[in-house]
Image (spheres, rainbow, N blue to C red):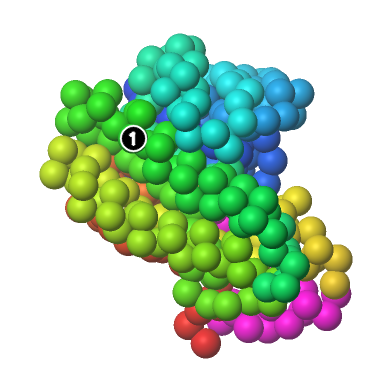
């Protein structure tokens, strides 16, 4: 018997960063669970390729090419997101940047961009989409935290500050909106092969060291995110809010 608590049939989801990596994997998983998904990213061609992939598999998807680095543009972006299928019930904030600069190399420009995309955009986009969720009495916000939400890594000053902020933002969003039926949680992935982590996965020693640090004994695969993302986006997580779910193979347990 299928458990309908995990079904996203009839729901509309928005996933930022959907053109590649974690965002694309999550957007595809939500579409597979029945949601109509609007993917948001800067690279229109990659978004369109993702839409074609979802539709070929029988899902519903639409692309919204947008730059999330400008908080003042969020109302306009939210209107475009709501155009294909209606206002989203589910928002996944997966877009992110990581300049990988040492503390001595960080500039005001790289610091500002990192915090705008990784921390400000998730809040202001949610703020623009929450009124429609509140009117329905149901909504899901899923942020993407990180191992660096709680741990310091080399060349991670700006990124780590932004992801530490995402963890606290998740709790603050939950406090603000959960009473209206809108839960907010975060996924904190371990090491997954994406464009953002390419410098790490190019180093065979680092790959092996990171895998050995996990309890499971391997690094993440993109399909490992599907179940946790669907859970946090579905009615199955009705009584879960303000939580950071580490999908890291036990990396943070050791």
Q: How many labels does the image show?
A: 1
Give the answer, above or below, for where 229 lies relative to 164.
Answer: above
Q: Main secondary structure of the magenta part?
A: helix
The magenta segment? 204-225
Q: Residues within 10 Å of mark 1 (few under 14, many from 20)?
A: some
Residue 137 in percent (x, y) is at 17, 31
- In the image, taking residue 127 as reference, residue 121 lies left or right, namely right
Give the answer, above or below, for where 9 lies relative to 97.
Answer: above
SS under mark 1 = helix
- In the image, taking residue 247 as reference, residue 3 lies left or right, namely left
Q: Which residue is drawn at 76% across and 23% down?
A: 45
Q: Nearer the viewer, residue 32 or 1?
A: 32
- In the image, taking residue 202 as reference, residue 91 lies left or right, namely left
Q: Residue furthest left?
A: 179
Q: Which residue is drawn at 23% across and 33% down?
A: 138
**Quadrant of the rendered image containing residue 79:** top left
**Is residue 5 highlighted in magenta?**
no
Report the residue marked by disc 1. Answer: 127
Residue 27 appears anywhere in the view: no
Q: Residue at x 48, y 12 (%)?
A: 84
Residue 63 appears anywhere in the view: yes
Residue 191 in percent (x, y) is at 65, 66
**Quadrant of the rendered image containing residue 243:** bottom left
Q: Nearer the viewer, residue 7 or 66?
A: 66
Give the answer, above or below, for where 244 lies relative to 254.
Answer: above
Residue 142 in percent (x, y) is at 41, 47
Q: Quadrant of the N terminus?
A: top left
Residue 123 in percent (x, y) is at 40, 43
**Is residue 224 highlighted in magenta?**
yes
Q: Residue at x 83, y 80 (%)?
A: 205
Q: Which residue lies furthest to the top in this view?
A: 83
Q: Residue furthest front?
A: 108
């Amino acid at each position: 018997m299928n458990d309908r608590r995990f079904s996203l049939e009839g729901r509309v989801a928005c996933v930022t960063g959907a053109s590649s990596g974690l965002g694309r994997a999550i957007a595809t998983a939500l579409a597979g669970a029945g949601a109509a998904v609007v993917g948001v990213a800067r690279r229109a061609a990659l978004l369109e390729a993702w839409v074609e992939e979802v539709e070929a598999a029988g899902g519903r998807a639409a692309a919204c090419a947008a730059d999330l680095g400008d908080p003042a543009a969020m109302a306009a972006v939210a209107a475009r997101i709501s155009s294909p299928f209606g206002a989203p019930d589910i928002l996944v904030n997966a877009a992110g940047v990581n300049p990988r600069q040492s503390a001595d190399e960080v500039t005001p420009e790289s610091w500002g961009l990192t915090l705008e995309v990784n921390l400000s955009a998730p809040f202001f986009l949610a703020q623009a989409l929450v009124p429609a969720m509140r009117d329905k009495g149901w909504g899901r916000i899923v942020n993407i935290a990180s191992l660096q939400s709680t741990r310091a890594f080399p060349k991670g000053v700006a990124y780590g500050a932004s992801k530490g902020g995402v963890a606290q933002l998740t709790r603050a969003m939950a406090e603000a909106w959960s009473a209206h039926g809108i839960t907010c949680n975060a996924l904190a992935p371990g090491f997954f092969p994406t464009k953002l982590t390419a410098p790490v996965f190019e180093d065979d020693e680092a790959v092996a060291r990171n895998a050995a640090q996990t309890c499971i004994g391997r690094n993440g695969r993109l399909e490992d995110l599907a179940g946790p993302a669907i859970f946090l986006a579905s009615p199955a997580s009705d009584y879960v809010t303000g939580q950071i779910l580490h999908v890291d193979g036990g990396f943070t347990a050791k």
